[in-house]
Image: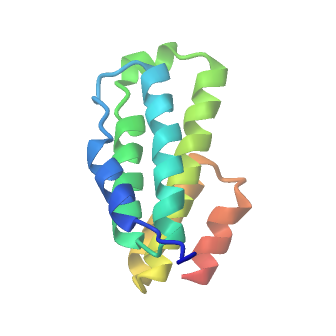
């Protein structure tokens, strides 16, 4: 009696339900990004780095899948938000890869984060940690 039971299975089942179409609107993609961050935060707290990195990667692909013509029409605020989101996703992927002891993949993710935002110190930190 009085024991707390944590159900890791709930987080994993939520992960499988998260989907976003590549051709979705910017707002839908950013909503997807918010949900991914929330779910992955829980996964990382449970030490589930494989599923978290997979979901982070899927989200990064969705955010990167903006056709060049649409990207050129986006206002500066949306471009900034997209770059921030990509940087966050890639630094989190790098963290997961570090925890999984995969330094080459961590360095690649950190480089992707730096490409999205060269001024992000956390991306350089992750690269150094790897």
Residue 43 located left or right of residue 50: right
Residue 84 at x, y percent in the picture: 62, 42
Q: Nearer the viewer, residue 97 or 4?
A: 4
In the rendered image of this protein, does residue 63 appear above or below residue 9? above
Does residue 46 appear in this view?
Answer: yes
Q: How many marks?
A: 0
Residue furthest top as drawn: 73
Residue 49 located left or right of residue 20: right
Q: Nearer the viewer, residue 58 or 9?
A: 9
In the rendered image of this protein, does residue 114 appear above or below residue 66? below
Residue 6 located left or right of residue 62: right
Residue furthest front as drawn: 1
In the rendered image of this protein, does residue 106 appear above or below residue 73? below
Residue 9 at x, y percent in the picture: 32, 63
Q: Nearer the viewer, residue 58 or 87?
A: 58
- Residue at 49%, 80% in the rendered image: 98
Q: Nearer the viewer, residue 63 or 39?
A: 39
Residue furthest bottom as drawn: 101
Residue 116 at x, y percent in the picture: 56, 47
Asked where in the image residue 127 lies, by quadrant, the reply is: bottom right
- Residue at 36%, 56% in the rendered image: 10
What quarter of the picture does the C terminus occupy? bottom right
Specify the color scheme.
rainbow
- Residue at 40%, 79% in the rendered image: 104
- Residue at 34%, 33% in the rendered image: 65
Does residue 111 appear in this view?
Answer: no
């Amino acid at each position: 009696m009085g024991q707390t039971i944590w159900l890791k299975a709930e987080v994993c089942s939520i992960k499988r339900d998260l989907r976003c179409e590549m051709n979705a609107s910017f707002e839908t993609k950013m909503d997807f990004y918010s949900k991914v961050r929330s779910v992955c935060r829980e996964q990382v707290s449970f030490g589930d780095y494989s599923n978290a990195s997979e979901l982070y990667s899927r989200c990064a692909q969705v955010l990167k899948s903006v056709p060049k013509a649409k990207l050129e029409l986006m206002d500066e605020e949306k471009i900034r938000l997209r770059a921030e989101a990509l940087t966050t996703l890639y630094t989190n992927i790098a963290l997961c890869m570090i925890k999984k002891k995969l330094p080459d993949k961590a360095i690649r993710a950190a480089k992707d984060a730096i490409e999205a935002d060269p001024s992000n110190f956390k991306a350089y930190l992750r690269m150094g940690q790897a």
